[in-house]
Amino acid sequence: MHPRPALRIPATYMRGGTSKGVFFRLADLPPQAQQPGAARDALLMRVIGSPDPYAQHIDGMGGASSSTSKCVIISPSTRPGHDVDYLYGQVAIGEALVDWSGNCGNLSSAVGPFAIANGMIAAERLRDGLVEVRIWQANIGKTILARVPVQGGQVVEGGDFMLDGVAFPAAEIVLEFIDPSDEGDDGGAMFPTGNVVDTLDVPGVGQLEATLISAGIPTVFVNAADIGLSGSELQKDINADAQKLAMFEAIRTAGALRMGLIQRPEEAAQRQHTPKVAFVAPPADYTASSGKTIHAADIDLRVRALSMGKLHHAMMGTASVAIATAAAVPGTLVNRAAGGGPRESVCFGHPSGSLRVGAAVENASGPWTVKKAVMSRSARVLMSGWVHVPADTLR
């Protein structure tokens, strides 16, 4: 037997917002994995440690949660007016699946710093202050502007910006999602059905009001009270309850069918990343997962969302865009929970704390559209070097 050395691939492990992922330069991937397909998926799954029947990711870089089972591929952009192309893969934990159907808003905040650190931004642009990195989000075909603090040509990571769901302060990175509706190949309007509220017929649940929106990421919003919840739930209240998780998957599947994202219910299992499903409630006092009290007077509404079949510990960045956009449109369930009326921003409570997001929407000449959504995040490098993958991963 002649042992083959493991593949040794340059990589950077980064936190972006409330997520973590393994970042690669496209040119550093093995030739077979530089193109979409089975080889690339096999490589990224092995990097993360999936599929793992133990759901622990002991033999990989993943963290056994939807927030930490992620890979990112960055390359200099070939699209005019952009600096880098950003491709995101959500790696399933227990299944052999990489879902490419949407973006990760949290890891979007790490793309600009990665691009700067890897020489993808011209040195003359790296003046002290905020440097704007223009990102082409290749999964959904949209532009993201990241304003990254720089000093002496280097990314500034330290600062006093606190993001609920992240233990330590860091430098603030402002993200602007340009025209975030109309999700890539799926097409369609911001409200795919043309309605700000629809009625879904959900097996095991019955008829259920829902706002179906495609902004940031396709999202199905329902009222917490309509499904027997308060809106103040934490992860432990949902993720250990198989019956509740099954209910949310049924809601997600019904929403995906109505939005035209899938044609048959069984297709939902192969499209786990999208759509998201979230439930909303008016503001109320509650205790966040950190033990901090979130006061009703400090928030406009409460929102909880599921990612890859489990309640998220904070809030996905893309779902935050959907929240901001839906809140700005009178009559949606999100807008109603926030008190109704026109608004340009909301502060919503999530399991780890609260977050303020904003969106600019209009319907002057027809259907509702969103011009941009804005939020703040932070990011930093956790490790840089090489990731090692067994040689037989790529055959």
Image: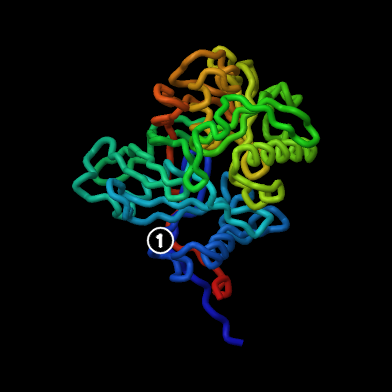
x and y percentages locating residue 188 in the rendered image: 51, 39
Residue plotted at (21% across, 41% down) = 127
Q: What amino acid does circle 1 point to? A: Leu
Residue 240 against residue 337 in the figure, above or below:
below
Query: Which corner quadrant of the image does residue 360 belong to?
Result: top left
Crowding around mark 1 (Cα neighbors within 10 Å: few <14, some 14 to 19, many 20+) is some
Residue 86 against residue 178 in the figure, above or below:
below
Q: Which residue lies most toward the bottom here?
A: 1
Q: Quadrant of the C terminus?
A: bottom right
Direction from residue 172 to residue 337 in the image, left or right:
right
Residue plotted at (44% across, 65% down) = 34
x and y percentages locating residue 379 in the rendered image: 43, 41
Query: Which corner quadrant of the image does residue 309 belong to?
Result: top right
Residue plotted at (59% across, 44% down) = 261
Q: Which residue lies most toward the left here?
A: 124
Residue plotted at (56% across, 17% down) = 338
Q: Which residue is mark 1?
A: 26
**Which residue is at the front of the view, 75 or 211?**
211
Instruction: Please say whether residue 78 is visible from this viewpoint.
Output: yes
x and y percentages locating residue 23 in the rendered image: 45, 54
Direction from residue 113 to residue 293 in the image, left or right:
right
Number of marks in the rendered image: 1
Label 1 element class: helix
Please say which color scheme the image uses.
rainbow
**Which residue is at the front of the view, 216 or 185?**
185
Instruction: Please say whether residue 66 is visible from this viewpoint.
Output: no
x and y percentages locating residue 246 in the rendered image: 76, 40
Q: Quadrant of the N terminus?
A: bottom right
